[in-house]
Amino acid sequence: MTFYSFIRGLASLVFKLVYRVDVEGKENVPKTGRLIVCGNHSSMLDPIFLGISIKRQINFMTKKEMFKNKILGSFLKNLDAFPVDRNGADLKAVKNSLKILKQEEILGIFPEGTRVKGVNVNNAKPGIGMICIKGKSPVIPVSIDTSYKLFSKVKVKIGYPIDFSETYNGKLNVEEYKEISKTILEKIYELKN
C-alpha cells in the first residue's frame, strides 16, 4: 500500500463521516493512461474531495507557499504533489507536469490557479491549455458543489474526457492556450448546472 492510498483511504473514511459525499460519473475516468483532472476551486478541501472521488492517484500541482512549512511540505511531497510559482511562467512546474503525463499518470490542476467564489471563465490560466496540448493528454472536468459546512452534501460530478488534440495541433500562442483553458472551465461549470 502506498502512502497516497493510505491517506486517501483515511481521508475517505473521515470525509464520508462529516460530509454527505455523492460522486457521479466515476466510470468516466479511464483505468489507465495519462489524464489531467481539472476542478473548480472554492476551498482548501477541494483537492481532498477530488482525491477521494477518483480511485487512481492524482499528482496535484500545488502553490509553492504550501511547501514553506517543512512538515506540510514533506507531507505533500510524500503524496507526490509538487510546487508551482503562480507569479509567472514556472518552467519547472510545467516540466514536472509533462513528466507525470509521460509516465501515464494523472495530473491534478485547478484552472483558475487559486480559490475563487464566483464563476468567471476569464479566470482560467493559459498554463493548463499548454500542458494538455504539449502533454498530449485528455482532460476530465470535475465539478465540486457544496457549502463546505460540516454534514452538508457534497456533489462531485465527473465529466467525460475532452481531447483537444484533434482541434488544436502544431504550435499555439498564449491566446489559443487561454481559449482551451476557458473551454475546460466552462465544462466544469456546465456540470454544476
Image: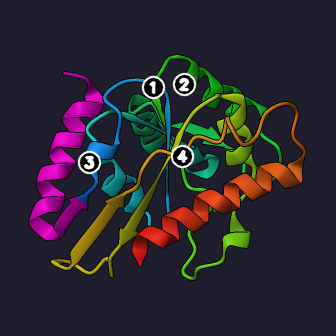
The crowding category of the residue bearing disc 1, from other C-alpha atoms within 10 Å (few below 14, some 14 to 19, many at least 20), is many
Identify the element where label 4 is drawn. loop
Q: Callout 1, which amino acid? A: Glu
Separation of residues labelled 4 and 3 (CA atoms): 15 Å
Tell me whether circle 4 and circle 1 mark residues in contact (CB < 8 Å). Answer: no
Q: How many marks?
A: 4
Separation of residues labelled 2 and 3 (CA atoms): 21 Å
Tell me whether circle 1 and circle 2 mark residues in contact (CB < 8 Å). Answer: yes
Identify the element where label 2 is drawn. helix
Tag nearer the camera, 4 or 1:
4
The crowding category of the residue bearing disc 3, from other C-alpha atoms within 10 Å (few below 14, some 14 to 19, many at least 20), is some
- Does the image show residue 113? no
Does the segment drawn in magenta span residue 2? yes
Q: Nearer the viewer, residue 15 or 179?
A: 179
Q: What percent of the width, then of the height, locates residue 18? A: 14, 69
**Numbered mark located on residue 100 in the image:** 2
Q: Which residue is mark 4?
A: 162
Q: Is residue 192 left or right of residue 49?
A: right
Q: Which residue is mark 1?
A: 105
- Does the image show residue 32? yes
Kindly identify the residue that appears in the image at 66 percent across and 77 percent down. 120
Tell me whether circle 3 and circle 1 mark residues in contact (CB < 8 Å). Answer: no
Give the residues in magenta.
1-23
Q: Callout 3, which amino acid? A: Lys
Q: Nearer the viewer, residue 63 or 60?
A: 60
Kindly identify the residue that appears in the image at 66 percent across and 43 percent down. 84
Q: Callout 4, which amino acid? A: Ile
Tell me whether circle 2 and circle 3 mark residues in contact (CB < 8 Å). Answer: no
Tag nearer the camera, 2 or 4:
4
Question: Toward which corner of the image does residue 125 lie, by quadrant?
Answer: bottom right
The crowding category of the residue bearing disc 4, from other C-alpha atoms within 10 Å (few below 14, some 14 to 19, many at least 20), is some
Separation of residues labelled 3 and 1 (CA atoms): 17 Å
